[in-house]
Image (cartoon, rainbow, N blue to C red):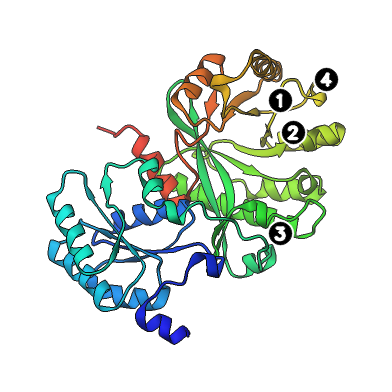
């Protein structure tokens, strides 16, 4: 059965395999291939790439993609050869063309694909919005998460499946990238990109320390990579209070810090619930980090938390969820006001997270938040893509 599937290049169905769909991006321009592959991976696809028509048969045999995306930024004859190659090799998955909105060539090639018997999706016309892509790929989305993953942190570390993605933190006044929040992901060879909720161990699990050490090592390496390209950003990493309470970890954290003026501040994000659980111990940890000039960012703060009555918490930043800030009621606005007032008392900066609309952005800025994060600015991305994003926003030197 497997040989038969490979011979005719029939993509195995997602529902039967309980795996994310696979996509092969075909285009002569490497940066276009990378852009399309990254965009589709954000939707849950497992992506591969081909630079020319001659590579397509091999890609069909090795990856059995459910979808082939063919860009028009290569000679028209090569696009034609790609479509004919798919037809000759009996490809029965879907094909989507990618090209200019007003391109007559796109229309002609769409007709050719249909005449060849290929299952052509509507073409993705540029410029496009996320909603356009979601509408075209509706049959592949949403991709339901696998209920039980046959991998754990140790296996992922051993096989180099873990990586850090970075979400920009935007200065709401000057609209510049101020910082990078490191978010861990697992890129499984068959399950694709897996969010942390499915593999993060509990705080009392010894593997939690292993994961924290990976986050620290990788973040410091990526931070150096950013600085070498003259992208100076404040770095935020997530660490559990359970790991930070281990006496030697704060020392290890300090020894990992780059000793150079090109590096901005390091922030360690901890959860508000963990701080509230044992505020005395949390304050001890914060003070130790403060001695090392490492700031503490408290996540998911709502109104005036219980630990705030203890006074001298060395907190550098308070984070608040603001996804629905534009239509919140007076009670919620009062909560934001209390949290912002607490930040002022502590001398801390504030971050509105989850901003997805222009009205939410404007309201977060008007209320008085210092920084914002959310899909309206940028989604989490791998280190090279984050660096490109920062450099594109920087003013060019004359």
The one nearer the camera, 273 or 100, is 100
Residue at position x 40%, y 53% in the image:
137
- Circle 3 — which element? helix
- The answer to whether the residue labelled 2 contacts the one labelled 1, judged by CB atoms less than 8 Å apart, is yes
Q: From the image, state whether disc 4 or disc 1 is nearer to you.
A: 1
Q: Which residue is mark 3?
A: 210
Vertical relation: 96 (above or below) 284: below
- Circle 2 — which element? helix
Q: Which residue is mark 2?
A: 272
* Residue 369 appears in view: no
First in sequence: mark 4 or mark 1?
1
Q: From the image, state whether disc 2 or disc 3 is nearer to you.
A: 2
First in sequence: mark 4 or mark 3?
3
In what quadrant of the picture does the C terminus appear?
Answer: top left
As drawn, the label of residue 302 is 1
- The answer to whether the residue labelled 4 contacts the one labelled 1, judged by CB atoms less than 8 Å apart, is no
Q: Quadrant of residue 368?
A: top right
C-alpha separation, residue under disc 2 versus residue under disc 1: 9 Å
Vertical relation: 253 (above or below) 33: above
First in sequence: mark 3 or mark 1?
3
First in sequence: mark 4 or mark 2?
2
């Amino acid at each position: 059965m497997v040989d038969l599937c490979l011979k005719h290049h029939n993509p195995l169905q997602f529902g039967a395999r309980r795996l994310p769909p696979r996509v092969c991006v075909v285009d002569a321009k490497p940066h276009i291939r990378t852009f399309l592959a990254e965009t589709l991976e954000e939707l849950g696809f497992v992506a591969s790439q081909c630079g020319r028509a001659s590579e397509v048969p091999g890609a069909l045999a090795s990856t059995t993609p459910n979808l082939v995306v063919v860009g028009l930024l290569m000679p028209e004859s090569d696009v034609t050869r790609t479509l004919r190659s798919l037809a000759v090799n009996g490809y029965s998955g879907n094909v989507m063309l990618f090209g200019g909105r007003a391109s007559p060539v796109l229309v002609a090639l769409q007709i050719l694909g249909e005449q060849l018997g290929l299952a052509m999706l509507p073409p993705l016309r540029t410029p496009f919005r996320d909603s356009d892509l979601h509408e075209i790929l509706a049959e592949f989305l949403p991709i339901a998460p696998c209920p039980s993953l046959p991998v754990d942190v140790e296996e992922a570390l051993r096989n180099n499946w873990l990586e850090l993605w970075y979400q920009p933190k935007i200065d709401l006044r000057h609209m510049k990238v101020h910082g990078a929040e490191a978010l861990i992901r697992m890129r499984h060879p068959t399950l694709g990109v897996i969010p942390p909720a499915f593999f993060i161990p509990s705080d009392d699990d010894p593997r939690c320390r292993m994961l924290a050490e990976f986050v620290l090592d990788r973040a410091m390496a990526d931070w150096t990579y950013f600085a070498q390209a003259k992208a100076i950003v404040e770095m935020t990493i997530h660490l559990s209070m359970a790991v930070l309470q281990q006496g030697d970890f704060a020392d290890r954290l300090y020894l990992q810090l780059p000793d150079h003026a090109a590096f901005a501040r390091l922030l360690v994000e901890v959860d508000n619930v963990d701080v509230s659980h044992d505020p005395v111990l949390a304050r001890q940890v914060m003070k130790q980090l403060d001695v090392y000039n490492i700031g503490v960012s408290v996540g998911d703060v709502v109104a005036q938390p219980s630990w705030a009555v203890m006074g001298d918490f060395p907190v550098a930043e308070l984070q608040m969820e603001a996804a629905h800030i534009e239509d919140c009621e007076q009670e919620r606005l009062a909560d934001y006001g209390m949290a912002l007032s607490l930040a002022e008392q502590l001398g801390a900066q504030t971050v509105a997270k989850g901003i997805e609309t222009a009205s939410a952005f404007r309201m977060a800025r008007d209320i008085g938040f210092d920084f914002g994060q959310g899909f309206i600015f940028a989604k989490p991305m791998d280190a090279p893509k984050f660096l490109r994003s920062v450099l594109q926003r920087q003013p060019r030197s004359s």
